[in-house]
Amino acid sequence: MKHIKVLGTGCANCKNTMSMIEDVAATKGVAIELEKVEDLQAIIGYGVMSTPAVVVDGEVVHAGGMPGRDSIEQWLMG
Amino acid sequence: MRQNILKLSRNNPYLFLGVAALLWFVLYQQLLPLSQALVSIFPVDPASHLGGALQFFFYDTPKVLMLLTGIVFVMGIIHTYVSPERTRAILAGRKLGVGNTMAATLGIFTPFCSCSAVPLFIGFLQAGVPLGITFSFLIAAPMVNEVALALLFAMFGWKIAALYLFLGLTVAIVAGLVIGKLGMEKHLEAWVRAMQNTGAASAVTNQHMGWAERMDEGFRHVSEIVGKVWPYIIGGIALGAAIHGYVPEEFMVSIMGKDAPWWSVPAAVVLGIPMYTNAAGVIPIIEALIGKGAALGTVLAFMMSVIALSAPEMIILRKVLKPVLIASFIGIVAVGITLVGFVFNALL
């Protein structure tokens, strides 16, 4: 099971990123644990400067803007 | 159709760029005759007010949208080269002066969204970018951006766009310099101060990108930006057309015109501070104000104030800045913008 966190202070793109990841996981049938991190100090703790950012199993894989569908599939399947 | 275009842009990016650029230029050259042809379809006299308004609308709408699409596409590609992380690395440890100039200039090209202003602010301080230089970046990034410049260029010509660029950068550089000289570090929240110069935390590095991926970013940027702002633009041009075609009521002239009292510029700036909208949202207002005889300097000062200073951004920044620093930030930028308004009015 993959632990995925979306970092962001609550802008529209962060919510879209969340639902896109949920959607991809559902269509691919991958079990994930999805968490939203809104606390500023926690976000900064990841070294992220532009949100939304995505953390997969503790590793920052994406920052600044919505990730593409292809990238999400790679994170989930890889 | 869409699939085929995407396929071409992936398989043969240079060919695609060449063809797209050529089509763009040819179409752009034909806009005036096309708009005249379009007006002649309607049963109105082209010399009448309504004819003039229609002509203005049919010419300006595609012109502005085409320019915006072109510039936003190019900026989307540039963004794949300039990440906030890279900008931060360039600015770390710079001296005041040169550093401020670089920060403001990089602010034009670095992707920036006001919703991530705070992580960015702290990320800069963490990596050892001085406070004043960080502020230069934070002021320039939203104010002097490609959307504002493209719209000013399309609607008012390159001279106005260039003046806006130059004076916007000047405000960002000087305001950052002043904040840096004042030694405001003690007005950062304690937890932020503790993070200053702690070294940059690890950041995602963009894996090597090919041209096809960079162009995909360009497309994505266009659909994100142009997809969001087009209603504002059409609304603005429609408003402009209405004013253009009919005799403007000159009721703004007395309070915002050339011979308005001296306080009209500061009043416009103060009015703009709490207001929040992006560059596209403010353009319709500007069209309307200029159409009704407001002076350009006053209007541009208003525009800068609306874009650069906003209540929501101040509320976010309050998490990292103490009230004294927020007040100084607003005060210094507002004074800078006011001076810009006076200079503009005096020059034009």
Image (tube, rainbow, N blue to C red):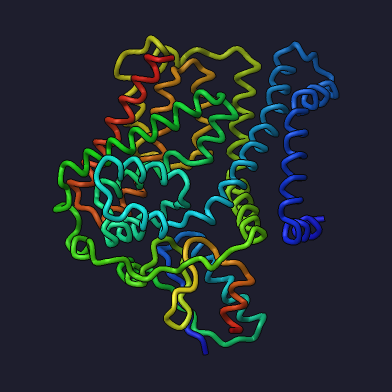
Q: Report the residue at 64% width, 72% height from top.
A: A70
Closer to the camera, B21 or A36?
B21
Image position, residue B45 (x, y; %): 80, 13
Closer to the camera, B237 or B124?
B124
Left or right of B12 on screen, residue B127: left
Image position, residue A53 (x, y; %): 46, 68
Depicted A30 relative to depicted B124: above or below: below
Q: Report the residue at 65% width, 53% height from top.
A: B219
Left or right of B317 on screen, residue A12: right
Image position, residue B166 (x, y; %): 41, 30
Q: Report the residue at 62% width, 18% height from top.
A: B244
Depicted A35 relative to depicted B30: above or below: below
Is residue B59 visible to the viewer in this orientation of the structure? Answer: yes
Depicted B34 relative to depicted B251: above or below: below
Left or right of B327 on screen, residue B315: right
Q: Report the residue at 40% width, 54% height from top.
A: B87
Name the quadrant of the N terminus of chain B. bottom right
Which image quarter: residue A19? Answer: bottom right
Q: Residue furthest bottom?
A: A1
Name the quadrant of the C terminus of chain B. top left
